[in-house]
Amino acid sequence: MRVCDLIQRKSPFLSLEFFPPKEREAWPAFFAVVDKLKVLDPLFASVTYGAGGGTQDNTLEIATRMKRDHGIEPVTHLTSVGASAEKLDAFLDSLRAADIQNVLALRGDPPRGVADFDFNAQEFKHASDVIEHITARYPEMCVGGAAYPEPHCESPSIKSDLDMVLLKVKKGAQFLVTQLFFDNRLYFDYVDRLKAMGSDVPVIPGILPIMSLKSAKFTLSLCGAAIPGKFLSALEKAYEEGGDDAVYALGIDYATKQAQQLIDGGAPGVHLYTLNRAEAVLEIGKNLNI
C-alpha cells in the first residue's frame, strides 16, 4: 500500500521509525520489538539506511520481513550519498519485487572516516535529485522527504531551508517527515510557512522520547535540535534527584503531551523515533487519544 493513500484514509495516526541492527544476532530481539509495537496499529514504519547506503541490504530485508511477516507497511529510507542511477534503480527494483511502494528520500550524512567529503561531487547532490529520479522512473512509488522545523544545520537561513523543502515537493515528494524537535510552536509555524509558499502535502512531526540525559544530549549533538531551556533544566534536576529513572519518566510524559498537542492542533499524525525500544513507545502510544 502507498503511504500517501493511507494518510488520506486515516488521520490522525501513529507511525514509527526503526534502524537496522548491524549484527544479525540482534535481529530476533529487533523483530520482537516490532511485534510488541504492532498493538499500536502504526500506519507505517520507516526503516533507516546507513551513511553511503552502508546498510541498504539490511534495510531491504528488514522492510520486506516487516511487511510480509509482521503486517506493517514499511517506508524505506534512501540516501543520495554515494548513490548512482544504477544503484538507486537496483534498490528500487528490489523494492518493487517485494511489493514495497514507499520511500523516504534523504541526502544523508557523509560516510564516516571520509575527510573533506564533497556533496557537490556526487551524482545526486540533494535529496530533491533522488525524489525527481524516483518520480520519473518509478511512478507507482510514494516518495516522502525530510523537513526541518529547526533549520538544517547547513542552511544559511530559514528561508533557504524552506525553499529547499518546497523544491522536494515540487520534484514529487508527497509527504514530509520532520526532524525531531521539542517546541510545537516551531512545527505549526513551519507548516504555516510551507502552506503560504504553496505546499499542500502532509507534514508529519517527528517525536523523540527522551529516555536518558546522556543519550538525549548525544542525539541532539548529531541532529542540531534544541531542547527548550525549561525542559532541559527540568531534565537535569530530575537526573540529580532520581537519576535516569526520573529522566525517563519526565521524558515520556513530555513526549506524550507534545504528541497529543500536535494531534489536537491538526497534525496529520505523529512519527515516533523508537530507537528500537518498545517500552517507552508503547507507553506513549497507549496514552494518546487518536
Image: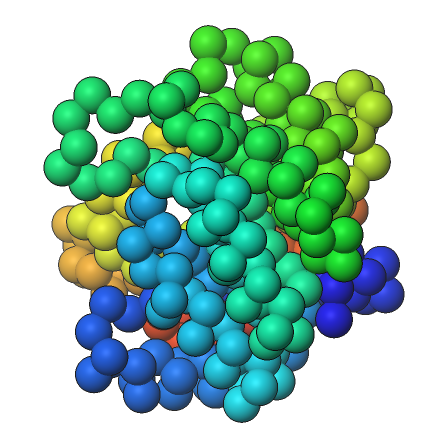
Rendering coords of residue 155 (x, y %): 46, 16
Residue 126 in sight in this render? yes
Q: Residue at x 79, y 19 (%)?
A: 197
Q: Is residue 88 above or below residue 171?
A: below
Report the quarter where the N terminus lies. bottom right
Q: Is residue 100 above or below residue 212?
A: below
Q: Nearer the viewer, residue 90 or 222?
A: 90
Q: How is the image coloured?
A: rainbow
Q: In which quarter of the image is residue 244?
A: bottom left
For the point 17% across and 32% down, the residue is 114
Comparing 179 with 133, the one in front is 133
Q: How many marks?
A: 0
* Residue 31 pos. (x, y %): 40, 83
The residue shown at (67%, 64%) is 101
Residue 109 lies, in percent from the top left, at: 34, 37
The answer to whether any part of residue 232 appears in the image is: no
